[in-house]
Amino acid sequence: MNQANFDRERGVKLLATMERIRAFEENAVLAAERDKLVLGAIHPSFGQEAAAAGVLWPLRTDDYLISTHRGHGHTLAKGADPIAMMRELLGREGGCCGGKGGSMHIADFNVNMLGANGVVGANITIGAGAAHGVKLQGGDQVVIDIFGDGAANRGPFLEGLNWAVVFQLPILFVCEDNQYAATTKTTSVTGGDGPAARAASLGLPTQTLDGNDVEAIADAVTETITRIRNGGRPEFLHVITYRQKGHTSFDQAAYRPDGEADKQMADNDPIQRQKNVLAAVGVAADEMQAIHDAAQAEMAGALQTAADTPFPDEALAFTDVQDVGSPVVEAF
Amino acid sequence: MAVTNYSDAAREAVREAMRADDAVWCIGEDLGRGGVFGQYRGLQDEFGPARIADAPISEAAIMGAAFGAAIVGTRPIVEMRFSDFALCAVDELVNQIAKARYMFGGQSRAPMVIRQPMGMWRSSAAQHSQSLESWYTHAPGLIVICPSTPQDNYSLLKAAIECDDPVVYFEHKNMWGLEGDVDTAEAAVIGEARTRTHGDDVTIVSWSQTANFAVEAAETLAGEGIGAQVVDLRSLWPWDKNAVLDSVNKTGRLIVAHESVAVGGFGAEVVAIVSEKVGAALQGRVRRLGAPRALIAYAPNLENKMRVTAEMIVDAARDLMQKSKTKG
Ligand SMILES: Cc1ncc(C[n+]2csc(CCOP(=O)(O)OP(=O)(O)O)c2C)c(N)n1
Ligand SMILES: [Mg+2]
């Protein structure tokens, strides 16, 4: 890394985003396990923070994001309010989705975050369609569509990527490869040369990146997004990272080879790696500690605020189903 | 008021909606050439290939991408070609489109129409003939419409396109050429039945093509002095319970007739509501006509075994009249 050209301000912000994501999820796990306040499943992204922070770095607020069940990090990096997100995880009033969605369905249309999804792979065609809608309306937004390595084995991967190529849509598909699909090593159930090779066969320009190098991801995606915004053509990014913990917060992940996770956490933690990068260009340890402490305080506060918020009014169980034929009207 | 057919009436509704609102567009296989049944013929000349768009044979992507385009501000009309193929896109329809508004706490809408040509036509066998409308009535979030006349295919399709909820829209393949008067000034309200014939003796509830058979049956019955009131539901969700209950309260006899399999069909829902509301007064004077729980064959004589005909409706009405000369 060239010290003279290093963008110190960006580097520090990327670290801060990753620290905020980790602190959010640490608090979410506490809420689930210690406090029993999160009743449904949550899928943390410990170890994958660089993918979220780096990929979302160059996006404008009016650009679109569509994500997965493991989407807290992407959503925070897109600019969603952590208090509203934490309220959603706890099923409270004022949650992003009014407490109706929970962790797996977080959406925040204020920042054009079009939703996490409980169905693996479903967001691939939907994201292509969002880009289709942008094109039809003559907009200059770009869509970022993030999915896991497991999703590359579902049909929508083929249909959605082909769609974006055929209609020449402004979308970046990001396969965030944490090497596992639930409890299965994904390579053991994936034929051929993997997601990037499949995407290339459909005519998409592809890049494969170290998913724990936040600087490299931010650099690549900044250029890629500019290209997509100007040219309106889809591209594909395969970022290889590692899921440090279980599939859900309750999964001990004992199925992994001994030592694999320990080694990853010791040598390849994306936050530690970025701290090393920043230290090398002269960012003081105190400054980095302050970023960490601020993130921890913010997210502990978000959890406290959420825990102090009431559950939604019961009448809301039947609102926002549909206008015509609504259960509120059709009660008999 | 002009005479036109069921297919052209729908095409006119699409044309008018697309002229009125740039956000409306159509996506499906072979639409540029007019669609497999010609129901889009000529529209690409007027609106161009971006708004009358040819899709790859990717039903999941057609449905999913149209949904994605809907949540960012467009109003897609999705063509599924045959309702049977919509089964390749059920996750997108039932898990995504129907649920997005609720799951996201009202942040998004999916204003879309999903056109699904349905029903037995001629020797199309088990994968091109089904009537699965009742499935979608079971999925909260969706509206289900089954028009039976050119007028309704015009008015209801227009209403469906203007509606902000996702609408599953079943057109019967055997009726594309059916002619009738269409008054383009007539608006339809989704959820209102049309009473096709009036009578005091028996209520016949139906929809789609079978509603037309019910009207034929009512004409035959009128010749025998039996007054049949045909209530064409037109939409199954929401459905016009009041029109049905008012009629049954008057006639004291109920027949529901539909082309789809009787078991688990929407007729069962109609009978259930009627029995909850006026069950005692009916004293069992109820008949449900639907297909046997069997598969639709290619050979015409076997295919015919699955049909609910006007004659079957007439027989059921006569039978109900025999069983109970006095109303309860
Ligand atoms: C269609 C579908 N099949 C199965 C599941 C259950 N499931 C939830 S997450 C998951 C693993 C997904 O793996 P991947 O795409 O790599 O994403 P990751 O969980 O690693 O982020 C599975 C099997 C689901 N939610 N949807
Ligand atoms: Mg994975």
Image (cartoon, coloured by chain):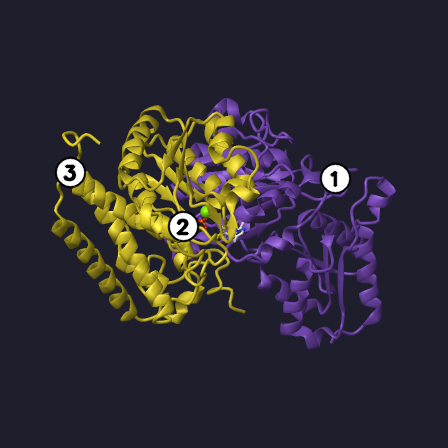
Q: Which residue is mark 2?
A: A243
Same chain check for tags 3 and 2? yes
Q: Could you say which is closer to the camera, residue B271 or residue A67?
A: A67
- Residue at the right extreme? B301
Q: As displayed, is residue A180 above or below residue B10?
A: below
Same chain check for tags 1 and 3? no
Occupied quadrant, residue A303 = bottom left
Query: Is the C-beta of the residue carrying label 3 under 8 Å from the nearest atom of ligand 1?
Result: no
Circle on res. B61 = none
Q: Is residue A99 left or right of residue B142?
A: left
The amino acid sitting under disc 1 is Trp
Subunit of label 3? A
Q: Going from the N terminus, do you reach mark 3 or mark 2 first?
A: 2
**Quadrant of the image containing the C terminus of chain A:** bottom right
Subunit of label 2? A
Q: Which residue is mark 3?
A: A281
Query: Is the C-beta of the residue carrying label 2 under 8 Å from the nearest atom of ligand 1?
Result: yes
Q: Position of residue B120 (x, y in %)?
A: 74, 43
Q: Residue at x 51, y 45 (%)?
A: A186
